[in-house]
Image: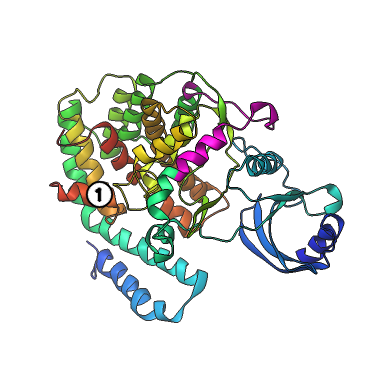
Amino acid sequence: MIEVELSRSVARWCKGATGVTGAAKLSGGASQETWRFDIVHPDGVIGAILRRSPKGYGAAPTRAAGLAAEAQLMQLAFEAGVPSPRVMHVLTAEDDLGTGFIMQRVEGETIARKILRDDTFAAARPHLARQIGGILAGLHSLPLGKLPELRSRNATQEISEFERDYRSLNWPKPVFELALRWLRDHDPGPSAETTLVHGDFRNGNLIIGPDGVRAVLDWELAHLGDPMEDLGWVCVNSWRFGEIDKPVGGFGTREELFAGYEAAGRKVDSARVKFWEVMGTLRWGIMCGGMMQRFREGPDHSMERAMIGRRASETEIDLLRLLAPRGS
Amino acid sequence: MQDEPTPVELTKSVADFLRNDITPLISGHQAFKLRVAINILDLVTRQLTQEEGSDAKEVERLRALLGVDGSVTELNRILADRIAIGETDLATPGLAEHLWATTMDKLAVDQPNYASYKRELSRGG
């Protein structure tokens, strides 16, 4: 029972805590798990989340920053006023829970379709695109000197990496080839400024309440690079969940996003944002191919993974809409 | 020649059984998985119905575009290679039209409810 280890752990660092209850696994692959649980405390129950790699699964995938870096980034973001859960404890060997961290649970919704359609969020929706601009500006302003060690990637390196991923699938797709050519022809080169890049900032990775964005989640793809990458990724059509005329996560316009970003004192380069949107669309398409490969060869022979392989064509139509729009 | 019912009719009968008789009995994560299963069978039905016709048209366009003959897989590989080396691009007459027609045929099977597809369909297919 994980509650035994958790109780022992919280007793060490949460003053007054008498135990934990209600531990439940929210998601988990072979190497990483997310659990929710409540810390029992005389002042009232404290909602908590455990993110961990179980014992024996220390190695992170190559693109991932690692759980220790993730915890450090979330704490830095929290301290800088970027909506983020407070990190309560970074696991140590004594915890006997593997590697990872425990953070405060933030209540709210992450399911994109609910956020886009439920009445609960109706008042927040018109403000989200601009709010997201401000949050990204805050995130890109985190001082480089305080960041954990992260991989660094510019546009040219990213194109090469995606091309290699795509070729390794042995899955000839003329539309993907066209996108790769376009990216090479429009490579903006290294950006004038290198900042922290969240790497997966999109509708679905944000906790949202009736009052707006409450927390930014899923920092595992954080790296150093061109800040415009995050602005392009949040606009990728796959993250609009059907609201295709509202590029920013299905919430609002690019103009609102850019205005929120610039109001917080940072500059937008819209040509770079467009470049990263094309890159992001191709990136998700290649990831769909990766899912297909894992379904075929790997341990995950699930129907869900199989069907994600059939979503690559969604990115092909979106790439054509970006690169070869009809009637223009 | 194989006997009937056809694969389309057989697959459809299983999808209808799961949809109408099993769905009301199941909840939670299993209900989610059941929906995925039904979606898969519906996709297979669409592919069995449409693939032959769309592949034939795709091969015809690819032959005209490339000036060579081959299977749909071989011709796609050749086109992908030519785009990769820059020999064929959006300035090549017929390429944009070919990619649009091919992609629309794929979405018709994969995700006919995808919003971008429905938008493009309403613009004339």
Quarter of the rendering occupied by the N terminus of chain A: bottom right
Front position in the image: A272 or A291: A272
Query: Which of the 4 quarters of the picture holds residue A284?
Result: top left
Residue visible at 35% across and 74% down? B19
x, y (%) of residue B16? 31, 74
Relative horizontal placement of residue A93, taking residue B27 as reference (left or right) = right
| Image coords of residue A132 (percent x, y) | 47, 43
Q: Quadrant of the C terminus of chain A?
A: top left
Q: Is residue B19 above or below residue A52?
A: below
Give the farthest residue toward the left: B124
Residue at 24%, 64% in the rendered image: B2
In the foreground, A187 or A286 = A187
Q: Quadrant of residue A106?
A: bottom right
Which sits in the foreground, B117 or A106? Answer: A106
* Residue that appears at 32% across and 59% down: B44
Secondary structure found at label 1: helix
Inspect this view and state whether residue A190 appears.
Answer: yes
- Establish if A254 lies above or below B111: above
Q: Is residue A282 in view from this perspective?
A: no
Foreground pick, A214 / A10:
A214
Could you say where residue A86 lies in the image, as x and y percent from the top left?
68, 50
Please tell me whether residue A286 is drawn above or below residue A22 in the rendered image: above
Residue bearing mark 1: B117
Tag 1 subunit: B
**Amino acid at circle 1:** Tyr
- Using residue B120 as the reference point, say whether residue A191 is left or right of it: right
Judge whether residue A326 is colored magenta: no
* Image spot of residue A285 (x, y percent): 40, 41
Label 1 neighbour load within 10 Å: few <14, some 14-19, many 20+ = many
Q: Any magenta on residue A145?
A: yes
- Magenta residues, as a range? A131-156
What colour scheme governs how the chains and residues are painted in the rendered image of this protein? rainbow
